[in-house]
Image (cartoon, rainbow, N blue to C red):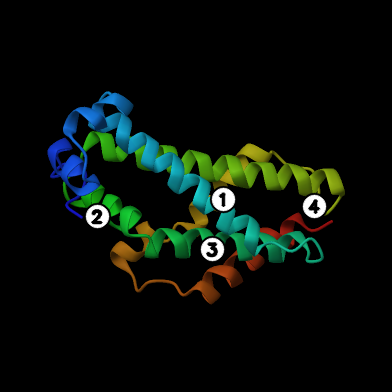
Amino acid sequence: MFGYKATTMDQVAKMANVGKGTIYTFFKSKEELLDHIVSSVISEIKHEADAAMDDRLPFSENVQRALQRIFTFRQEHELTIKLLQEMRDIGTAAVRDVMKRLDREMIAYIREKIEEAMAKGDIRSCDPDLTAFFIMYIALSIEWEKDHEPLSQQTIAELFDLYLLKGLSP
């Protein structure tokens, strides 16, 4: 509710209806608590992306569906909204670190899907690390939106298809 920087362990304990000592029994610091929460968010995002995929569809459609779920989740989840806002407005180091971790985890997830698609022959051989990075950061329209109108989900999907996915088709 208050963002990372403005939230105290006293507030966390009060909202959890436990003593502050109880919180410290499980988490040594506010940073460790944030890391645990972000781990849960990462699991939720991966679950959402997996649920969007259909083995009967080609890789290009599945990657679009998964990315759409990932970015919709990030745009609608209260914690990620607050963390992105705090990172942009205040630049809190701990928040910046967990957001980088979130991005790294999403890139690793995409890399895994690329490796699976290559193994099945759904896409031609490529550098899965670089391709995952490229996919993730094209999809991140946050930088674009600083100086331009936001891209619609449909436009992002069309751009993926035009610039990247058709180039990977066997």
Q: Residues within 10 Å of mark 2 (few under 14, many from 20)?
A: some
Q: Earlier in the sequence, mark 2 or mark 4?
A: 2
Looking at the image, which is closer to me, 1 or 89? 1
Q: Which residue is mark 1?
A: 46
Single out the mark in the foreground, 4 or 1: 1
**Mark 3 or mark 4: which is in front?**
3
Q: Position of residue 96 (x, y in %)?
A: 30, 39
| Marks 3 and 1 in Cβ contact (< 8 Å) | no
Amino acid type at mark 4: Ile
Q: Which residue is mark 3?
A: 69
Q: Is residue 163 visible?
A: no
**Residue in front for this viewpoint, 26 or 127:** 26
Residues at marks 2 and 3, CA–CA distance in whole angstroms: 20 Å
**Quadrant position of the C terminus in the picture:** bottom right
Q: Amino acid at mark 1?
A: Lys
Q: Secondary structure at mark 4?
A: loop
Structural distance between the alpha carbons of marks 1 and 2: 22 Å
User: Circle 2 is placed at which residue position?
Assistant: 85
Secondary structure state at the residue bearing disc 1: helix
Q: CA distance from mark 2 to mark 4?
A: 37 Å
Q: Label 4, on which residue?
A: 123
- Label pair 4/1, CB-CB below 8 angstroms: no
Quadrant location of residue 33? top left
